[in-house]
Image (cartoon, helix red, strand yellow):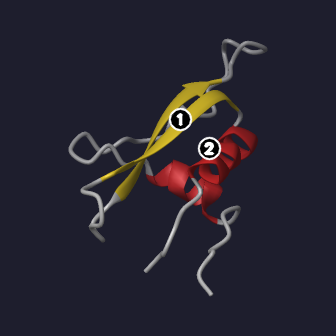
Amino acid sequence: MIDSVVLGAVESALVQHIKLSSCVVVADGEEGSEDKQLIAYIVRDNKDDPDDTRFSDWTIDTRSGACPEIRRAVSGHLVSLNT
């Protein structure tokens, strides 16, 4: 279980490691509930190369909105704050 998440750190990891132009991360769920999820709204950075196809094979689950490729790309760059 994770006690706390610094949303700005998640945003920073996404922008740095996936090459995004911007990103906003929000926590979704009832206040005080342990059943929360992070939702990231992302904007690709393809200004330099409009033909960039690095993301073309990424999948987004239409029911949950989850993208396994994003999770894998940033999971190693986030540090647990649990002690």
Residue assigned mark 1: 24
- Label 2 secondary element: helix
Residue assigned mark 2: 11
- In this view, 32 is above or below 47: below
- In this view, 80 is above or below 59: below
Give the spatial CA distance, label 1 vs label 2.
6 Å
Residue at 63%, 27% (x, y): give it.
22
Q: Is residue 15 left or right of residue 1?
A: right
Task: Residue lying at the far right in this picture: please name it.
Answer: 48
Quadrant including the C terminus: bottom right
Residue at 32%, 61% (x, y): give it.
36
| Front-most of residues 52 and 42 | 42
**Callout 1 touching callout 2 (CB < 8 Å):** yes
Residue at 69%, 38% (x, y): give it.
15
- Label 1 secondary element: strand
> For the residue marked with disc 1, what is the amino acid?
Val
Mark seen at residue 7? none
Label 2 neighbourhood size at 10 Å, few (<14), some (14-19), many (20+)? Answer: many
**Residue 9 in the image: x percent, y percent?**
66, 52
Figure label count: 2
Quadrant including the N terminus: bottom left
**Residue 77 in the image: x percent, y percent?**
70, 61
Q: Earlier in the sequence, mark 1 or mark 2?
A: 2
| Front-most of residues 68 and 24 | 24
| Front-most of residues 74 and 39 | 39
Label 1 neighbourhood size at 10 Å, few (<14), some (14-19), many (20+)? Answer: some
Q: Is residue 20 left or right of residue 42?
A: right
**Residue 3 in the image: x percent, y percent?**
48, 75
> For the residue marked with disc 2, what is the amino acid?
Glu
